[in-house]
Image: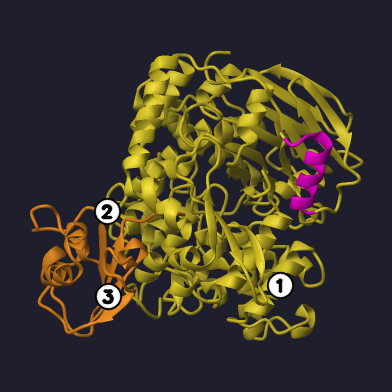
Chain colours: A orange, B yellow
Amino acid sequence: MKVKFFAYVRDKEYAGCREISRPACEDLKTLGEELSEAYGERFRHFYFSPDGENFGKELIILVNGRRAEFLDGIHTKLKDSDTVLIFPVVAGG
Amino acid sequence: MKNGYIGKILRVDLKTGSIKTEPLNQKSASDYVGARGLGTKYFCDECDPKVDPLSPENKLIIMTGPLTGTAATSSGRYNAVAKSPLTGTIGAANSGGHFGPELKYAGYDGIIFENASEKPVYLYINDSQVELRDASHLWGKDVYETTDLLNEECGETFRIACVSAAAEEGNLFAGIMNDKHRAAGRGGIGTVMGSKKLKAIAVKGTGSVEVARPQPFFHECISAREKLAAHPVTGAGLSAYGTMILVNIVNGVGGLPVNNGSAGSLFDTADSISGEELAAKHLLKNKGCFGCSIGCGRVAEIKEGAFKSRGEGPEYEAGWSFGADCGIDDLGAVCNANFLCNQYGIDPITMGATIACAMELYEKGYLPEEDIGFPLRFGDAAAMVKACELTCKMEGFGKILGLGSYRMAEKYGHPELSMSVKKQEMPAYDGRAIQGIGLEYATSNRGGCHVRGYMISPEVLGIPMQMDPLVTKDKPATLKLFQDLTALCDATGICLFTTFGIGLPEIAGMYREAVGSDESDAEILLKGERIWNLEKRFNIAAGVEKDTLPPRLLREKLPNGPAEGQVNELHTMLAEYYAARGWDAEGVPTEAKMQELGMASDRL
C-alpha cells in the first residue's frame, strides 16, 4: 500500500516525507493510529478528531481517488494495492 | 456620499475627447450593487447586444463596488465590462491589486469609455484633473515597459492599468493589466481597450470612501477578518502555497485534464508542477492585494536554465494549462510561459489551452508543421514556451494561436477539439470527473469559466459542505446558489477568495453597513440573482449559442482514474438547473422571474 502526503503534512513536524510504501492495515482508523505512533502527537491531532473516533476537521483523505467520506469513512477497509492520499484542507482556484 | 459609493462616474468619449462627470445612477447601484453588476447594468442600458465587440460602438466600462477601497477585507477589486470579442457574451473581468481603490480615492466609482480614438491615448486622472494624453510613445510596449514609463511620466504613486501590444494587435484573449501583475484577464477585455486605441489609465487620488454606518461597518469588517484569519485555507494555506496547492488534490480525484483532455485526467508527474514544488524551489515571497489578509500572490524566480525568468504567479490555472494540459511537467517552463503572459497581458488559461489544442491538432495530422514552423508535440516544454512567446508578440503562428482554440481548431476543420464553451477555454478541472463544474462551464454567462460558480469547493475541497464529485444529485440548485452569491461578492468589490472563509452573512453584513441598507440577507442575495439574469438576457439578445459542453466531455469516457468510464451528465442536470433558476426549458428567463426580480420593465 502507498501512502502519500501533501502540503505541510510533508514537513518534519508531521510525516517528514512525501510518500511511504507499507503493508496494508485493517482500515483508515488503524492506519491513522499506526502513522500517529510513528510521527507523533501533532500528526495524531491532525488525523483524528479529539475523541479519536473520527477524522480531524483539517484532514482530507482519499483512497484510490475517492474521499473517505464517500466510502466507509474512518472504517474504510484497506488492501495492499490501495493508494491513500493525505492532505490538509486546501483551496485555490 | 456616505454610502460606500463616491457618487460620480467619468464618461470619456475617445472620439471627440470629451470628458464629463455625471452622478452615479443610485437606483441601478441599489439594484446591481457595483463592479460586475453595476458595470453590466450600465452596459446593457447603453449598448446594443448585437454590437461588434471590436467596433467603436462597443463601450468599455471600468466599475468599482461599494466595498472597494474600504476597510472591508480584500477590497481591492474592480471589474471591466464590455461585450467580449472572444465569446460574444457579456464580458466582465475582475481584477485586484490597488487600481480600483485608487480610482475611488480620485473621486470616481467608474469610467465609461465610448467610441475609439484615432491615435493612441491614455487617460490621466489626478483627482479632479482628468485628461486624455498622447500615448504614441507607449504603443507597442509591453505591460512592464508601459507601467514603468507612465510611472516616470506621471509619478511613482500613480496606479497604472494598461494593455500590451498583444491587445493592440487583436489577440482575442488579451486582458487589462493593473499594478503590473494583476489582470482583468478573461474574454479579451483588453482587446476591446486596445481596439479603442486606449493604451492605459493612470490614476492617483487623495480622497477617501465614506460609509453609512462607520461603527457597525468596522465591527463587520473586523469580524470577517477574524474568520478569515482563523480558517486554515484563508489564514494559512493560501499564503504558504498559493493556488497551485490544488494541483495534487485535483489530480488525486482524477480531475486534472491531460493533453487537452485527450489522455484523461490523471497526470503521473503532477507533483512536479505543484504548489509544494513551487514553494520549495522557486518562491521568493508571497504578495497580497489592497487590504488583503490572505496574500495568495506568488513572486517566483527560475534562477537558471533554458527557462530562466522571474515574475508573479503562476496560479493553479496556469500551472495546469501550461503543465498537464500540454503534457509538461517542467515547472520552469510553466513559470516562464506564465510570466510571459503577464508581461504581454494575455490570459494564461486560454493561452495554455490553445497551445494544448494545437498540440492535439498537430499530433493528429490536422495542423501542418509548416504552418507552425516547428514541431509542437505534447510534452515539448521548449516548443510550448516558444508558441506562447509567438502569441504574446503576435508573430508567425502566434497570430493563429491568438484567435483562441475554437477559431484555430475551426480553421483546421476540427472545432470539436477545442476544449471551450462559447469559444472560451474551460479551466483546470475535468467536467467528467467533477460533474457540477461541468454544469458551471456550460451555464457560465461568459463561456468556459470556473469563477462564476466554483463547484470545486463543495465537490473536491469540502467547503462549505461536501458533495460527491461523481454524482449529479443536488448540483443544479447548489450551482445556482453559488453563481448568485459569486455575482453578489464580485459586485461588492471584495475578492471571491474570501468566500472560502466567509459567506453570505458576512458579505451582506459589510454591504448593509457600508451602504446604509436594512435589507435582509435574502434580499441582498437576490441582487446577485438579478445580476445573473441580466447577464443571461444580454447573451440571449446577443444571439449567443446554447448552453452545452465540448463533445469530448459529453461522449468520450474517461480512460482512467476514480472517474473511469464517466462522461459529464449535462442532460440530466441542465433541465433541473433551468427549473431552479425559474427559466423555461430553453433556458430563457420567464416573465414571472423578471417580475420577481423587478426587471420586467428593463430594456433587456
**Is B336 colored magenta in this rendering?**
no
Dot 1 crowding, Cα within 10 Å, few <14, some 14–19, many 20+: many
Specify which label sits upstream in the sequence, 1 or 2: 1
Please tell me whether mark 1 sits on a helix, a strand or a loop. helix
Crowd band around label 2 with a 10 angstrom C-alpha radius: few (<14), some (14–19), many (20+) = some
The correct choice, above or below, for B339 with respect to B29 in the image is: below
| Picture quarter with the N terminus of chain B | top right
Q: What residue is pinned by disc 1?
A: B387
Image-based side of B287 in relation to B179, left or right: left
Residue B247 position, x and y percent, is: 44, 66
Q: Is residue B426 visible?
A: no
List x then y, in percent, for residue B431. Answer: 43, 64
Q: Give the prevailing secondary structure in the magenta stretch.
A: helix
Q: Nearer the viewer, residue B448 or B120?
A: B120
Q: Gap in Å between the C-alphas at discs 2 and 3?
A: 18 Å
- Residue B3 placement (x, y as % from top left): 52, 16
Badge 2 is on which residue?
B466
Disc 1/disc 3 C-alpha distance (Å) = 36 Å
Magenta highlight on residue B149: yes
Q: Which residue matches tag 3?
A: A64
Q: Which contiguous range is marked in magenta?
A: B142-156
Asked if residue B36 is positioned above or below residue B28 in the image, the reply reads below
Disc number placed over residue B180 in the picture, else none: none
Inspect this view and state whether residue B594 appears. Answer: yes
- Tell me the distance, in whole angstroms, between the alpha carbons under discs 1 and 2: 40 Å
Chain for mark 1?
B
Q: Amino acid at mark 1?
A: Ala
Q: Does residue B374 sit above or below B443 in this rendering? A: below
Kind of residue at badge 2: Gln
Name the mark nearer the viewer: 1 or 2: 1
Q: Which residue is painted at 82% across and 44% down in the image?
A: B149
